[in-house]
Amino acid sequence: MAALTLTNVNDPRSTLASLITSAHHLTRIAARATGDQTSPAVWRTLSILAADGPMRLGELAAASRVAQPTMSKLVQNLAADDLIRRIADVDDSRAWLIATTAKGERALEQWRDRLADAAAPFFAGLSDAEQRTLHEAAAIVSHRVSATEAAA
């Protein structure tokens, strides 16, 4: 895959497009390097629940951008593996919320550690200034995404 060319440092859309595309590519490469055969949908679902807290099946399907029947099957499998649990929705006694379990949170943390280990070689040899820049960029993205989600 060819690297995206940043055509204009003053064009934030170009920078963001490159950041999003590169982050996605890095995630795919790192995931392959781990050798883990777990579906990315599992990690995406656990990540959504860890970040956003318990939610109804339909909300979880929408957040994960999959059809509700697909999410139903995924939730069934995750529950069988004790990675998620169903809890009663206090706002609607007929509904259930899906939440992570402690085992699911540990599995997600371990997955993220394996991804970071697999991605680390791409960043070996960064200068101290480059390392600081990368750290600051990650902090900016995290802050902006968190602020946007909090406002939603």
Image: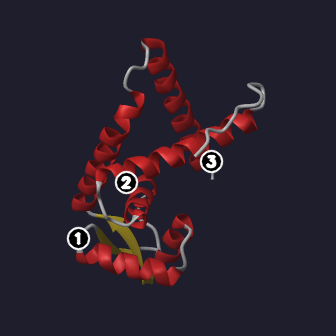
For label 3, the residue is 151
* Distance from the alpha carbon under mark 2 to that under mark 1: 25 Å
Q: Earlier in the sequence, mark 3 or mark 1?
A: 1
Q: Residue at x 74, y 25 (%)?
A: 9
| Viewer-nearest residue: 50 or 96 | 50
Mark 1 residue type: Asp
- Please tell me whether residue 118 is drawn above or below residue 92 in the rendered image: above
Q: Amino acid at mark 2?
A: Arg
**Residue hosting label 1:** 82
Q: Tag 3: residue type?
A: Ala
**Which is more N-terminal, label 1 or label 2?**
2
Q: Using the numbered discs, state the Cα–Cα distance from disc 3 to disc 1 in whole angstroms.
A: 32 Å
**Residue placed furthest toward the front:** 2
Circle 3: element type = helix
Figure check: 121 above or below 47: above
Residue 98 circle label: none
Q: CA distance from mark 2 to mark 3?
A: 35 Å
Give the left or right position of residue 103, taking residue 151 as reference.
Answer: left
Judging by the rendered image, the residue that carries numbered circle 2 is 32
Look at the numbered disc 1 and give the secondary structure of its residue.
loop
Name the one closer to the observer, 122 or 59. Answer: 122
Mark toward the start of the polypeptide (2 vs 3)? 2
Q: Are marks 2 and 3 in contact (CB under 8 Å)?
A: no
Helix, strand or loop for disc 2: helix
Residue 132 in picture, x, y percent from top left = 46, 18
Q: Position of residue 17 (x, y in %)?
A: 67, 42
Q: What residue is shown at x 45% (from left), y 77% (from top)?
A: 71
Mark 2 vs 1: CB contact within 8 A: no
Q: Assess disc 2: are there few (<14), some (14-19) or many (≥20) residues with their C-alpha within 10 Å of its C-alpha.
A: few
